[in-house]
Amino acid sequence: MAHNEVVEIRGHLIDTAALSRVLNDVDEYGGHYVVEQFDIGQGPTGPSYARINVSAEREDTLQRILMRLQIHGVNQVDPGEAEVGVADMDGVFPDGFYSSTNLVTQVRIEGRWLPVLNPEMDCGLVVDGVGAATEVRTLPMSDVRAGMRIVCGASGIKVTVPVSTKEEGTFGFMESDVSSEKPQAVLVRQVADGMREAKDAGKKVLWVGGPGVVHTGASAAMVSLVEAGYVDVLFAGNALATHDIESALYGTSLGVDLARGQGVEHGHEHHIRAINTIRKAGSIRAAVEQGVLTSGIMHSLVTHDKRFVLVGSVRDDGPLPDVYTDVIEGQRAMRAELDNAGFCLMVATMLHSVATGNILPASVPLVCVDINPATVTKLADRGSSQARGIVTDVGLFLEQLAMELSPTYRRG
Amino acid sequence: MAHNEVVEIRGHLIDTAALSRVLNDVDEYGGHYVVEQFDIGQGPTGPSYARINVSAEREDTLQRILMRLQIHGVNQVDPGEAEVGVADMDGVFPDGFYSSTNLVTQVRIEGRWLPVLNPEMDCGLVVDGVGAATEVRTLPMSDVRAGMRIVCGASGIKVTVPVSTKEEGTFGFMESDVSSEKPQAVLVRQVADGMREAKDAGKKVLWVGGPGVVHTGASAAMVSLVEAGYVDVLFAGNALATHDIESALYGTSLGVDLARGQGVEHGHEHHIRAINTIRKAGSIRAAVEQGVLTSGIMHSLVTHDKRFVLVGSVRDDGPLPDVYTDVIEGQRAMRAELDNAGFCLMVATMLHSVATGNILPASVPLVCVDINPATVTKLADRGSSQARGIVTDVGLFLEQLAMELSPTYRRG
Amino acid sequence: MAHNEVVEIRGHLIDTAALSRVLNDVDEYGGHYVVEQFDIGQGPTGPSYARINVSAEREDTLQRILMRLQIHGVNQVDPGEAEVGVADMDGVFPDGFYSSTNLVTQVRIEGRWLPVLNPEMDCGLVVDGVGAATEVRTLPMSDVRAGMRIVCGASGIKVTVPVSTKEEGTFGFMESDVSSEKPQAVLVRQVADGMREAKDAGKKVLWVGGPGVVHTGASAAMVSLVEAGYVDVLFAGNALATHDIESALYGTSLGVDLARGQGVEHGHEHHIRAINTIRKAGSIRAAVEQGVLTSGIMHSLVTHDKRFVLVGSVRDDGPLPDVYTDVIEGQRAMRAELDNAGFCLMVATMLHSVATGNILPASVPLVCVDINPATVTKLADRGSSQARGIVTDVGLFLEQLAMELSPTYRRG
Amino acid sequence: MAHNEVVEIRGHLIDTAALSRVLNDVDEYGGHYVVEQFDIGQGPTGPSYARINVSAEREDTLQRILMRLQIHGVNQVDPGEAEVGVADMDGVFPDGFYSSTNLVTQVRIEGRWLPVLNPEMDCGLVVDGVGAATEVRTLPMSDVRAGMRIVCGASGIKVTVPVSTKEEGTFGFMESDVSSEKPQAVLVRQVADGMREAKDAGKKVLWVGGPGVVHTGASAAMVSLVEAGYVDVLFAGNALATHDIESALYGTSLGVDLARGQGVEHGHEHHIRAINTIRKAGSIRAAVEQGVLTSGIMHSLVTHDKRFVLVGSVRDDGPLPDVYTDVIEGQRAMRAELDNAGFCLMVATMLHSVATGNILPASVPLVCVDINPATVTKLADRGSSQARGIVTDVGLFLEQLAMELSPTYRRG
């Protein structure tokens, strides 16, 4: 093996199986390893330490392994300086660019460790400024411009994995499991605690929602949570907003008569008329101000001056005038709202949950609630390792959450 | 077509699609039909009437079609007398035996229409006694004895389909649909109303449950419903009772620590020890009386003098001493509890739900709650057409139901 | 009831349950009906006829009911002339606009019945030209411009429901059911027959695919079907193309090593590098021409001069340079490929399947294959009533289909 | 901590995460640990070694932890002698009985290590004979008799975990994952290889099947595999056999017309007539010999002198005369067929798969095929850690397997 590098990792390597994953990854990426030193921590709280010599036949394979290992918090013992390349085309990174994780990351430039300003996965790292003013930030591929300075290879980079909250933390409840067979009342309380902690710390609670929120009759619960101050930002698509507005205007939600609890199969022209009505008003806020829209989730967000970002999809009708039809612009608008986020709840949507998981730093606690186990599994598969999943009924879950958090909420 | 018979049907033939199903069935069973008369009802409430000439190449095909049509309430215009054969072997019906539905059924013997005493699907009809003392009852195949008189063919039989509760009834909520996207709070209330109606009418509320009731942390809610008088009989397997008892003895339920909400993977020897403990006591009731078992669902059933039937399955450990290990004997014990049942709730079990659906008359309202849509679908597929399905989280559903029905219930 | 209209419907009203649905819809939309005449067809092939007087308290309710009934092929006995309004804002239809179905539709303008040129659901109908040159076409809401003449209300409109292929047709296989318990080999053959029929009739076979096509190892089968001429157009998102290209460049597909059949958890930077490589080349076609991309589905489409439309979503990384990032522009590009489509197969994608179902005329046979029953159900729920669903393994299904249709295909 | 014991474990502790599970289990069972020595293996093949001091407040807690750890292959450094208690009631183990794993196990009696003859999980260990004739075997709780000598506590017991086949073995294909997104063709081939290996070694191939085998149209494929010698024993319930026989007698399978591929909703009296026919013949074999049953899976098993064990369940109609209605007797019959099993394939049944997993030694390779991921997950959750899951279409999977293994098989 012509190429090798010595790396190290510290933390709960055994009981969290972190070391297993590190060694498996080296193996699967075609590298080899020798564990040069291993000091096991004592008891459930003592940290362990491992120093590993990683080698590969080719230099680029080695670099890819080293980048890969950083997801687990493995850094080079002697990281050296970051290598910086220059983009020579708009929208294209230099070959060998460093593909970022969503973990806390530092980059060594001219002997100084600089923090990456906004951790996000699958981005490049762009270096701005010079000397003392040098800054490093993540940059999505579509935003790179020719001439930008981009970090390449794995040298000069250090990531920090969040300390596992396994033992005492709020979100230890589903360490490695997605299941519907869990005591649900406990889970509701844990989510409520997470939201309270975020608010107490002066941080924002971010929601990501799908139309199931409306279809399951949970609108009143969510409105109550908006009023109680536990919804600062909502990321959603055209569907949630449309069915919420359809429900406010016509009392139906894509064929479900919410008062009677009976299905109205394919009541679909209601939603297209609802969209037309809002387009005529100019925007959701304008419809509220003109007295056209007088109830529902979107109305509540507007009247309580909360933020929402609606991003369209190829299946949309209309869409509502507030919807970003360009998905890359939509991603930018979502990123702009992440600042100071302290908790994220994803409810009943796979598309927007994965989209938010892609851009959210790993340091933000993240809970995903869906009746479909596949949504939660997919989220974790895509790299949002901090995601905790609750497989349950969305309508009943939000009811319970409203009863926990909103003193005035009364079941319909 | 050498063989034919004229049949008739009355009711909401169009808006409930009953007539469609009748004609499709004739077609699929290889018969032919001519609609001789059709009087359409006016408005949503007026009944329609159809007279149909059904024919087939062979007499046995015709008889099978006629039997088949009876599950839709289609009877012969001129039903004649029932044909009665004699079983010549134990456990075997005569060829051409009438296979029963779970609908209200009458059989014409010696010129008199006799009610079938205990409608159940997939049974034979046995004729007991003579003259004025003649009785007709359903009989499962395994209980037939040589010499018994068994109804054969479709002549002399009349079934009555329950009037659709579509317009105003309690259980119109899911006419033809199984979905998780329903306003759940309304459904909870409808189930509560159904249970109250049954109790007000002096009837029993029958529960069928799987271990998910315990795993989802709903034991306290169910205990509260037992105390409030809304659980008269419980049908279950070894698993629900075992995990309930394991939870009472050890605080865990197959690897779920219910207080912390964390999974204990494979905590399985707890359940085998719990079973051993009850076997040592002699029975669940004995364990309660000896002070060994002091809490949980089974404890609550015993102390409130409620009934339970536990029937085993091939995957059981132990089992508990109260479990019927012979499934045919278990079915008999379940049948013995059906008398005066006024409402049936099935929760988190496919096996016992299908088993109960097999023996329950169609006149008993039936609601099936499961997080898995397949359970509900399968139940309806097997012929329990009165089944209404709710796809939701079992734990939260039972919590909500307890809050509706039990004045003293407080969320854990 | 101040407002009423007499409508009529012809066809297999009973055995297809069409009449049930019509009457239920009147009821659910708050109207009333009297069936003035009903002539029942004889046998499975004779058509029935119904004339129904529909009434409602308000004129706009009546108009909505009438529009709604057209989904079922119910037309006014005396349809009169279409009412035409004028859009006074870009992107907004006049109030009371006719919301289109995806059925064959005619509009009566100045005494002449004009065909709607491109049936699509949830659009408006725009009237172009005057006199003999008058044309009517569907128009999505986002494309309406101030001054356009738009059909309003339900007068002067006639829709034709496709004759049910129930008795003899190719796609009668799943009349009203979605299930994994079907003889799969028969279904494979029926899809193959449908594709052959389309090609024999000189029509295009349209595919809609998700990344599961690649993940399940079915790329070779699909390439073989491209080569055999059974893939004319592919609608997909960034994911299918990216994972196909990743697989061609690196031999992995989002963490699945296809040769060994082992999972490589989170191998995700491979896909981001694959995208960067194609962006550097300029386009997928350019990458093929430069020799960068030499195998896989996208390569095969390029080298056989087949069409593809890739439309982005909010969760996309990159994306590939060929991807429409504006979803409304993407929808336009998809519409432009629908002309002369004779068969549509949807495989392993809910998002793009629903999107395609939204714009496809009901006259195009449509089969949806997915391991998840929810995808198929959702498609039908959104109004693609012609959709037939097959719940099966996508990889094995495409293998079998390739063995049916491609003489040279050999299992890997 | 008053009570403690020193244990040790050897093997791939890190890359298989075995050590993580051990330490977590101590923690979750309320114990404490100190890792006294840890020698890490070098590279993917070198074994590691750990010596751990485990302690607990109470002696019985410590014993339970020690028993628990044995499922991971952790043994006491100084195991001492096994403690033997005497059962004082039929069907009840002594308190503190050792609850067995399905791993290779040895027990030290009078200074000698004796092998446990038939490893099975959740049983007791009974000691028979004395002196040189002493034997130890597993015993299910229901078979214990007063006076039997039963191993208690964790002393004097050593278990051996099978060496992981991760690197080169046949069944490394799904190490820790259940997914439908796998290259299916590879998986088919791996199962075929596993069956060939078992036959080459002179061992039996055991099948466990549900009625989905018939419903998905895979009967012909399975018959072909019986004929080719790859089905030695079949474990199933009443349903598989009934629907197979119904299909042979009537051409339908619970409402699925297999030739046309169309659903016949609720064709249920066919199955009850099929059962009656076989009951009349006396048994399935008798029906074959009388020429009543002339095709299908059961026919094929009988004519090729293969074994089958059918065990009933509470939802059964009939049942067939060959069905064990007592589930404990059924379990005994299943155990009697396990001898010399070399491969086990479970197809489309959760109930019988879990039942078989309960009694199968961990040394038998086990693959579970189902379209429902929950079945596979549940199997692993119950302790069958050697289970490998394939989420795919059962019908197409068996077709492909028949094409691999049966030279004469031709797709229907």
Image (spheres, coloured by chain):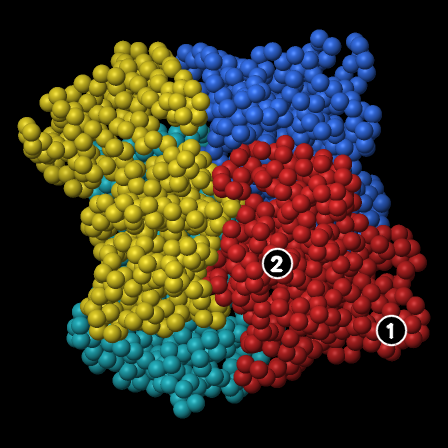
Chain colours: A yellow, B red, C cyan, D blue
**Which of the chains bears the disc numbered 2?**
B
Q: Nearer the viewer, mark 1 or mark 2?
A: 2
User: Does residue C12 appear left or right of residue A282 in this picture?
Assistant: right
The disc placed on residue B294 is: none
Query: What's the chain of the residue with tag 1?
Result: B
On screen, residue C286 above or below B189: above
Above or below, comparing residue D273 to residue A89 in the picture? below
Instruction: Look at mark 2 in the image and give the residue it sits on.
Output: B225
Which quadrant would the C terminus of chain D be assigned to in this image? top right
Tags 1 and 2 both on a single chain: yes
Residue located beneath label 1 in the image: B109
| Quadrant in the picture for the N terminus of chain D | top right
Q: Are marks 1 and 2 in contact (CB under 8 Å)?
A: no
Q: Residue at x 45, y 35 (%)?
A: A176
B162 up-or-down from B40: above or below: above
Instruction: Using residue C69 as the reference point, say whether residue C42 is left or right of it.
Output: right
Q: Nearer the viewer, residue D280 or D402?
A: D280
The picture places residue D7, in percent across and down from the top left corner, at 55, 16
- Residue for point 29% across, 64% down: A300
Horizontal side of residue C407 vs B94, given as left or right: left
Which kind of residue does numbered mark 1 sit on? Ile
Residue A251 drawn at (x, y percent): 39, 72
Identify the amino acid type marked 2.
Leu
Front residue (pair A22, A344): A344
